Image (cartoon, rainbow, N blue to C red):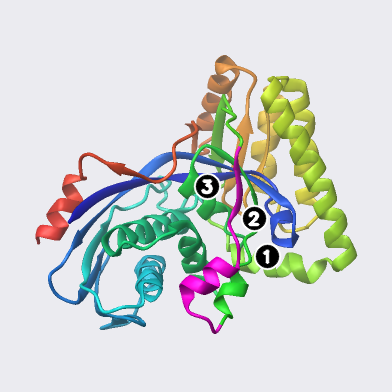
Amino acid sequence: MERALSAPSKLFLCGEYAVLWGGVARVLAVGPRAQALVRARDDRTVEVLTDAERLRGLCTPLGVRWDGEVTEAVRFAARAVDVVYRAHGRESLGLSLALAPSAHAPSGAKLGKGTSARTAVLAVEAAAAVLGVQPSLPLALLAHAEAQAGRGSGADVVACHVGGLVRYRRWPVERVASSERPLPVAVRDAGPVDVVRTGLGARFLCYAFAGHSAGTPQLIAEAEATLDGAARAAFVTESDVLGEALEEALRTGRFAAIREACEGLQRLLASLGKVQTPALERILALARGLGSTGKVSGAGGGDGCLLLSEDEGARGRLLASLAARGIHAEAVELSPGVRIETRADPLLTGWLAG
């Protein structure tokens, strides 16, 4: 059995911190897509191959016993494959999984578009296809959370899995992680993932990178230390109201309303302190000056901004202005979720043949 898969990147539209505290996130699946190739084996060996490393181990009903250290380069993929074998829970054969390299900024920095989430989705979907394990989305949420010590909301995982523009409320992954019941039972007891496909087609978007990547777990920890329960509840309420306004504005196509909602959401994020940096503010000021709008996408402290323009001409002028100032920016379009591909990436085919 052999299967080629691809999954998109992600960008937060709104609700980045609110979703951690019970609010709603709206997240976009966007390009570029990345591919994976999985092949069933006739022994118990499990392989994960990337451009940086080849990790090998042995599958068991309790997961995968890796032969060596699981490094940062393969951490999310290794955890994802392990979770699927744990969910399968029976003696089985192994697999070989190859994952294509991710796109980076010209400087070599990560762009902040959900590489780890996409990797978890691809690795879970690939291993689940070989082992016949379902449902795959909760397992991807669990794997991604375990790989980063429980931090994060899982919204990026959901976007990469489902595709398009989704509305998501946090799934209780900690309930599954702490359960003493068999993994499939714990997943079932946690209930379905609360995700809605909005069906909206957001247009004239671009993403501008601030020049360096952010440490999301640290920023989350600082935000949670700053706000007490009442302050978090107020933050969630305002985020949800503004998020609903932005979704409705996108639905009706009224750019003035889109701008108003985006500016409100950005002010709310900036109130958290370290989310907004001088580089991010520079990008947003430039967008405003050219008649576009935008906000920090993600935890902030680095990474980049999602920028929205009224039409193609305005987006083109914004991209040209950003490029003239040496800021890496790219037009983005909505993309489908994880899917089977009819042709495998020749690079990955070569890795599995090697």
Mark 1, secondary structure of its residue: helix
> Can residue 93 be seen in this snapshot?
yes
x and y, in percent, of residue 179 in the image:
57, 80
Indicate the amino acid at tag 3.
Ala
- Foreground mark, 2 or 3, reads 3
- On screen, residue 41 versus residue 285, left or right, reads left
Q: Which mark is residue 159?
A: 3
Name the outermost residue toward the right.
Answer: 230
The residue carrying pointer 3 sits among few (fewer than 14), some (14 to 19) or many (20 or more) residues within 10 Å by Cα, namely many
Give the quarter of the figure containing the C terminus.
bottom left
Mark 2: amino acid = Ala
Q: Earlier in the sequence, mark 2 or mark 3?
A: 3
Labelled pair 2, 3 in contact (Cβ < 8 Å): no
Q: Which residue is mark 2?
A: 299
Residue shown at the point (47%, 48%) measured from the top left? 160
Which residues are the magenta region?
A: 180-197
| Residue 189 belongs to the span the image colors magenta | yes
Which SS class for mark 3?
helix
The answer to whether 350 appears left or right of 326 in the picture is: left
Q: How many marks?
A: 3
User: The residue under label 1 is which amino acid type?
Assistant: Ile
196 is within the stretch colored magenta: yes
User: Could you say which disc has been placed on residue 220 in the image?
Assistant: 1
Give coordinates of residue 11: x percent, y percent: 56, 44
The reply to whether callout 2 and callout 1 are in contact (CB within 8 Å) is yes
